[in-house]
Amino acid sequence: MAETSNSHRKLRIHALRYNPAKADDTPRIQTYELEEAPGMTLFIALSEIREKQDPSLQFDFVCRAGICGSCGMMINGLPGLACRTVTKDLPADISLAPLPFFELIGDLSVNTGKWMRGMSEKLETWVHSMGQSTDLKRIEEAMDPALAEEVYELDRCIECGCCVASCGTARMRKDFVGAVGLNKMARFRLDPRDKRTDADFYELVGDDNGVFGCMSLLACHDVCPKNLPLQTQIAFLRRKMVLQGTKG
Amino acid sequence: MKIVYTDVLVIGGGLAGLRLAIGAKRRGHDALILSLVPAKRSHSKAAQGGMQASLGNVAKGQGDTEDVHFEDTVRGSDWGADQEVVRMFVNTAPKAVRELAAWGVPWSRVRKGDREVIINGQKVTITERDEAHGLIAQRDFGGTKKWRTCYAADGTGHAMINTVADQAIADSIPVHERKEALSLIHDGSRCYGAVVRDLITGEVSAYVATATAICTGGAGRVYRTTTNAVICEGIGHAIALETGVSALGNMEAVQFHPTGIFPAGILVTEGCRGDGGLLKDVDGHRFMPDYEPEKKELASRDVVSRRMEEHIKKGKGHKSRFGEHIWLDITLLGEKHIHTNLREVWDICHYFLGVDPVKEMIPVRPAQHYTMGGVRTDPSGQSPTLKGLFSAGEAACWDMHGFNRLGGNSVAETVVAGMIVGETIADYCDKLANTPTVPLGLVREFVEREQAKLAAFTKGGGREDASLIKGEMQDLMTAKVGIFRTGKDLEEAVDKLQKLLVRSRSIGLRSPSLGANPELVTAYRVQRMLKIALSIAYGAAVRTESRGAHFREDFPRRNDAEWLKRTLATWKSESDTLPTLAYEPLDVTRMELPPGWRGYGAKDYIDHPDTPERQKAVEAIRAQYASDRFAMQKALMPYEHLLPEVLRGKNERIDERF
């Protein structure tokens, strides 16, 4: 592992502190200083702060490997996954804030889980087999290998919330389903096991809280930690929904 | 006192818990899931390489059956597994993978025709059959005779939990997120639910249920270097242990995965080696064939991890500023393969190491990975000593992995156990006699006891620092209770862990809030984690043999004569500093596959006195039923009666139609 010229810098982490459960608390920025270590990620830095400096600092990490989507936060003004953000790629002053839009739990921790569950319920983000039952003893139904890869590509979403946090429409429409929701609709629309038709999908996202709410600012596409093809998926879905909407 | 009532209380929102809850709910029982985190963020998500099920679709999987999967699993376990449970598992795994396919998991599929793969460092052309086109594909994994591991690129656990969590939403199963079970409510013979703390508000309440299931995954975080997520702290194990009644089985059986990236310990999948990746030393020499000529890089994980550490001890590791490591070379697989089938690996290397694995080798070293031990249950998933308590998945010891788990068998176990225990728990709830009369006084007593314990941290005047104790425990476990173990190290670890446990009873907090408070969480968890650490270390100290992942340098042979038995740890009294150990023998005379050589690793072992006779009996049965594998299996070791009826029956394959 190459030694970086930046190692052993003094980092200053400016974290937004606020506990909404405390009646008298007001939001403020708190600065923590610590020495940078080789290979240090924001997960390592924040864990060290909690262990050695401030045991009350709230944040969320689970996998610390960039796959579970727990640690979305604003890192120097942009939404991203803290666990896989390496400090050497950042200036010595690092500002951290919770993702906007989601319910704040405290400090850097937001309730993305609750919002994602609501979105899934609303958009019914599961395969609708329409009563087709499967005999588990029998050979599975074949699926085109390329199509399976395409579905997997869209299935890689980790529901971190970065797309919604960066979304202009979400600022104005609290019920907007976000790129995460639209991508899921594109995923199930692509999946031949889901028997829903465009008419069904239109019912779910054919309005301003769905695909027509998107203003194509596409910050979602730029910040998605999994590099999902959100731009093309939203455009494609919109075209299909326009066709569906103009049918009648 | 706030009480939530449900039929089935599932503690843990990973794959096992989700699938179990779906099963119970579909049988008409209310199921409610408690989860530390949103369900989809559970550690099941981190499973990369795949799920074993003997579909036999790919050319290299042809001829695979439950029988081959069974033997691989038992050999992998170093004969520590319950063979009936392994049979239940291998027969259900194909059904599980097919159910997941129907539910929407984007399994990677077989393409007919020629394709180039890397086997043993060489390019080889494989021709896939026309009739397999579009069926679920399998890749090679360690310790398996056939290519059996079904996968969705290298995000298999991710794709599975997306699908299963969404099915749970479709079935309107509530997941109470950011809730932690602090203790099980019980009267010494029966479990009534759990005392639960809300991690956002700090509120403590009771969840009362007919049946309670612990599906909380592993306990890797008792170690310093682990692939496990930060939530895998073994609290589910601990609350079962703290009942004093329910036992933990084989806690000393801890798996170290060969390829944690160095030094962070983040996993890169066994699929790297399964797809043809090689392990190389400081000289760029591929060393595994020198040690393991039969299986090379694809021996079982315990064997490969030991060989890597052995090679490093010989001075053949690459020295870096963080210590020594081995290289994992997947450059030979080519850019297209890596970007399609190993893309999460690419991401991890890119973000955490600044390495492009298409062009460069990956620094790796074994890291704690899997907890074979767990809450002891019978084959139905129920505790034999605490009625109404069930367990499934990594948290459980029912016990299909014995002393070493095969890659691809854990994520398979989660859903298979969820399917099976989902049915058995529903059967349990169906019976009127099992509907408890809830002793509300007892419930209240348990809630108040937990509240008092929490208050003691904030007002008890203790001076010990929770994070410090936790760190010392983790360092001890990694240094003294790791891949190579000795009596001396283990005794030292047990001694020091006991002292840490005593110190943990005087923890004080710097931030004394009972609400959302990460320090308070560390405080009450570290007390419980120490009991798990002690169960591992003490169990390892007493077991004077080597079996699977438990390797004693001072007792290097597997000793079936004395140690073909399962360790059972209980924690009798809150003032104890050690678990009480008991042993449950495994019955050779009923084994379908009597103990022998695994096919890799050490060849010498001490036989059980019953083995030769059983071996003879098995051979006679095999000869008698040579033409019918099903009849043969039934004569060797009937197991189907243990499976829920809906899950019984043969599995169809291209080469085996019914």
Image: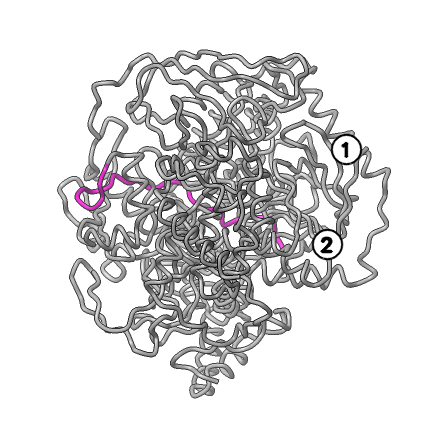
Co-location on one chain, circles 2 and 1 = yes
Badge 1: few (under 14), some or many (20 or more) residues near its Cα, within 10 Å? many
Q: Which residue is mark 1?
A: B447
Q: Residue B323 in the image: x percent, y percent?
A: 27, 30
Q: Nearer the viewer, residue A141 or B372?
A: A141
Q: Position of residue B501 (x, y in %)?
A: 58, 27
| Colour pattern | one colour
| Magenta stretch, residue numbers | B355-377
Helix, strand or loop under label 1 = helix
Residue A52 drawn in magenta? no
Q: What residue is pinned by disc 2?
A: B30
Mark 2 → mark 1, Cα distance in angstroms: 23 Å
Q: Is residue B363 magenta?
A: yes
Depth check, mark 2 against mark 1: the one in front is 2
Crowd around label 2: few <14 · some 14–19 · many ≥20 (10 Å): many
Q: Is residue B293 above or below residue B60?
A: above
Left-right relation of B473 to B325: right
- Does B223 appear above or below B139? above
Instruction: Choose between B636 and A156: the one closer to the eye.
Output: A156
Q: Residue at x 45, y 41 (%)?
A: A214
Q: Residue at x 57, y 16 (%)?
A: B464
Count of numbered labels shown in the rendering: 2
Query: Is residue B320 left or right of A226 when viewed as pictured?
Result: left
Instruction: Name which quarter of the figure residue A200 lies in.
Output: bottom right
Front residue of B540/B67: it is B67
Question: Which quarter of the figure is the N terminus of chain A placed in?
Answer: top left
Chain hosting mark 1: B
Mark identifier at residue B286? none
**Given the image, on which type of amino acid does mark 2 rest?**
Asp
